[in-house]
Each structure stands twice: as C-alpha cells, then as structure tokens.
Amino acid sequence: MTLLLPAGEWTGVTPQSAGWRFLSFHVERFAGADTRHTDGEETAIVLLEGRCSAEVDGTRFELGPRAGVFEELPWTLYLPRDTEYRLEGAAELAISSCPAEQRLEPVLQRPDEVAVEVRGAGNATRQINNMIQPGFPAERILVVEVLTPAGNWSSYPPHKHDEDRPPEEVVLEEVYYYRAPAPEAFGVQRLYSPRHGIDETWAVRDGDLVLVPYGYHAFSAAPGYDFYYFNALAGDRHSMAASDDPSLAWIRATFAETPKDPRVPLVAA
C-alpha cells in the first residue's frame, strides 16, 4: 500500500483507493456554481481559502472570507447524508466524508466558534483548531487543523488509534494533508507499527498527503518555516481516543513543568 501521496500525484482518497472502510477526502479549487449531493455520506466542507456559499434545503450558509490557513481560522460546514446542496463562489475547499446511518442537521461552524487549543510544551508546542470533534452533532466524521511552528514537533508523543478498546483507544482511519508557506519548506512524518511490520519516515512538502491506516505517528516541521496540516478521521466510534507509544509516553508528563512556545498560537480569532 502506498501511504505517501506527493502533491500533483493524487486527486482524492476513497475507501477503495486507501483500502479501508470509511474515509474519503479531497481538496479542490472551486469557482462558479455547482449542485451536488452527499448521497449516503455525511460530509465536512472546510474553507481553506477564499469565500463561498452553500444553499441547503432553502437555507444559505456563508463560508468566509478566509485569507489562508496561516492567516485565519477555518469555516466548517457539516452536511448530513442524503442532502442536495448548491455551492457558489471562489474558494479552496477540503472535503471529507464517510458513510452514515443517521440523517442529522446541517451545521455551520464559524471561526469564532472553533476551540483553539495550545497543546504540548517546549519544542512540542503546537496549535490545534478543533472543528468537528467528539460532542459535535456528527456520526463518524472528525476534522481538525494543526499548526506547527518551525522547528517544533506535533502529534507528539507518537500515538496510534488502531485497536478497539474504548475508552482508552478506538480504531480511526486518518489522512494528513500538509500545507507550507514556501515550496522549499519541508517537514518530517514518521509512521511505525511493530505489529504491522512498518517503520517509515518521509520528507513531506506543500500539498502532500499521508494515509494513516494504523500505527504510531508523529510530525516535525524543519526550521525556518511553520507548517500546517489538516486531519480528517473516521471510524465506528465518534471518538479521538488514542494511545501513546509506551516507550515515549513519559514525555507527556514533562509538559506540565515545561514552558510553552510563546509563538503559539500562530493564528488567532
């Protein structure tokens, strides 16, 4: 299975292409107007840049403007399954979806409603933009943005979510979609699992995508450039429960006595 998808060599991820059960994901630059349907999947539309509207069952939802992922917080529109909607505007969109049994209600989350979290400490300080998370009225889909200052680590200590043993851990399929402020900028993504016989480390750049079907994972932004990544996740349970690599879990306990990086948050409301 190919887990690193370089920019320009991928157009989207589906359960069929990824070899998993639920999650679909793509990024598109949209201009104009288009009528679409969610079919049997709940769908999260996240505005990365620009401005657009979505008309859903006679209600018009406005997303944006957003100058970019390094400048402003996100707008997120949740759409339930079996929903027709009409998009209009000029925008870059991250669209995540997965099958759902329930038909819930559309929800627009504005930037001032995003729960911004400064997580970690020291050179593992990063910004989390919590969008569709447990407690949000969705069935399976989860979306979050992470901003990592230059030289820092995130998704750290390395953690995994590939065993169903709630409440400590649940099984989640996940994508990492990276954005960087310059083409020469790069980060490092590690994914490893003794149980699955994998240990990979990749240099990742603007527009790359990594699939995380299992295993511990952690990311670092090389010095000089801040990094952004978008996580979409889906599984049987609407939970973010994960377990740390036991050999590195002790690092989490040091965060309480280590100062946070004063550069974070990188983007505020």
Image (cartoon, helix red, strand yellow):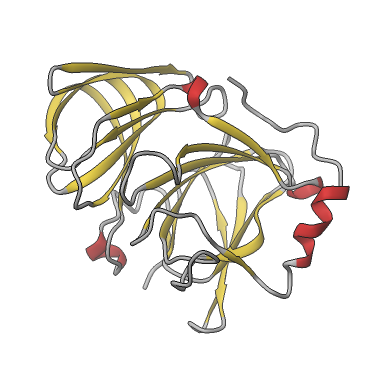
Find residue 68 and report its horizontal and vertical position in percent: 49, 25
Q: State left or right for residue 230 relative to residue 124.
A: left
Front one among 203 and 193: 193
Question: Which residue is at a point 26% across and 57% down the rendered structure image?
Answer: 14
Q: Quadrant of residue 95?
A: top left
Front one among 181 and 165: 165
Could one spot residue 68 in this view of the protein?
no
The N terminus: image quadrant: bottom left
Q: Against 7, is 49 above or below?
A: above
Question: Which residue is at a point 60% across and 64% down the rendered structure image?
Answer: 159
Q: Against 127, is 189 above or below?
A: below
Question: Which residue is at a point 80% across and 32% down the rendered structure image?
Answer: 262
Q: State left or right for residue 102 relative to residue 249.
A: left
Find residue 244 and report its horizontal and vertical position in percent: 64, 66
Q: Against 232, is 106 above or below?
A: above
The C terminus: image quadrant: top right
Q: State left or right for residue 197 relative to residue 7.
A: right
Find residue 136 and report its horizontal and vertical position in percent: 40, 39
Q: Quadrant of residue 155?
A: bottom right
Could one spot residue 10 in this view of the protein?
yes
Question: Which residue is at a point 46% across and 71% down the rendered structure image?
Answer: 162
Q: Against 202, is 90 above or below?
A: above
Find residue 178 and report its horizontal and vertical position in percent: 50, 45
